[in-house]
Image (cartoon, rainbow, N blue to C red):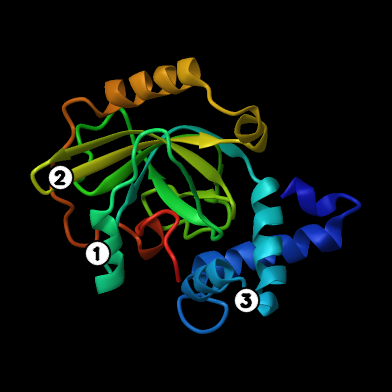
Amino acid sequence: MPVLRGKEQDAARADLIALRMYLHVTEGQLSHGALSRALRIGEPRMLPYGACVASALNRLPSYRGVVLRGMGSGSAAEASRAQELPRPGELLRDAAPLSATPLDPTRAAAVPDRSYVVWSVAGRRVRQLADLASESEEVVFAPGTHFRVLDVRRDGSSTQIYLRELTSAAVAAGPDPKGDQDVLTRLHDVARGRTGTPASPGMWRERCAGLIGAGP
């Protein structure tokens, strides 16, 4: 990677090694699950690791477009929180990195039930550091990313929450009704006719499912 040949070579290498560990380590104190839980409760020992992951993401190319994230149901507490759906206009923020899967507009696959449909502007492509054997690409949002809830749709057991990723400048600028409506129109156009399909077993990578803004 060209970034490793710059004058910040050592810092870049440390950052990218941290992100690669986040993407590949599945057990123990350096796993993505352990990091997410630690950042959500503000565990001081894990903050440098989280900072390196965030810095590494800033070194990778951004992804602009629609991505999907499963809402998950991994625990009774999470299932309970899932019943308390956010309302349009609310801001969601998660202290942990968040992974999602790009929605391929050329494929007929439906948007699964119980999912977030997100307009990404600064999510980062991590294919260079992820499992190259995997057919699906992954987009990772940095810790602390804000999302605005644009719409919540329920149809029986099917739930889709439409979100707009906000940059720091957009958060500081406050409400943006026209921008929100433009993004929501894009999301609806892409997702139209695709909603309501049950998620198949194994559809979501573990990192690509779970409530946004969830506690530990």
Amino acid carrying mark 3 in the image: Glu
Residue denoted by label 1: 79
- Give the mark, 3 or 1, whose residue is nearer the N terminus: 3
Q: Position of residue 86 (x, y in %)?
A: 34, 45
- Element type at mark 3: loop
In the image, residue 211 sits, relative to residue 148, either above or below, namely below
In the image, residue 139 sits, relative to residue 23, either above or below, namely above
**What number of labels is visible?**
3
Q: Position of residue 169 (x, y in %)?
A: 67, 32
Q: Nearer the viewer, mark 2 or mark 1?
A: 1
- Front in this rendered view, residue 164 or 83: 83
- Front in this rendered view, residue 135 or 13: 13
Q: Position of residue 158 (x, y in %)?
A: 15, 45
- Mark linked to residue 43: 3
Real-space Cα separation, disc 3 to disc 2, in angstroms: 35 Å
- Residue furthest left as drawn: 156
Real-space Cα separation, disc 2 to disc 1, in angstroms: 14 Å
Quadrant for residue 42, please give it. Answer: bottom right
Q: Answer yes or no: do the residues labelled 3 and 2 have beta carbons within 8 Å? A: no
Q: Position of residue 55 (x, y in %)?
A: 71, 54
**77 left or right, relative to 133:** left
Residue appearing at x 45%, y 71% in the figure: 216
- Mark linked to residue 158: 2
Real-space Cα separation, disc 3 to disc 1, in angstroms: 24 Å
Amino acid carrying mark 2 in the image: Ser
- Give the mark, 3 or 2, whose residue is nearer the N terminus: 3
- Give the mark, 2 or 1, whose residue is nearer the N terminus: 1
Residue appearing at x 51%, y 55% in the figure: 94
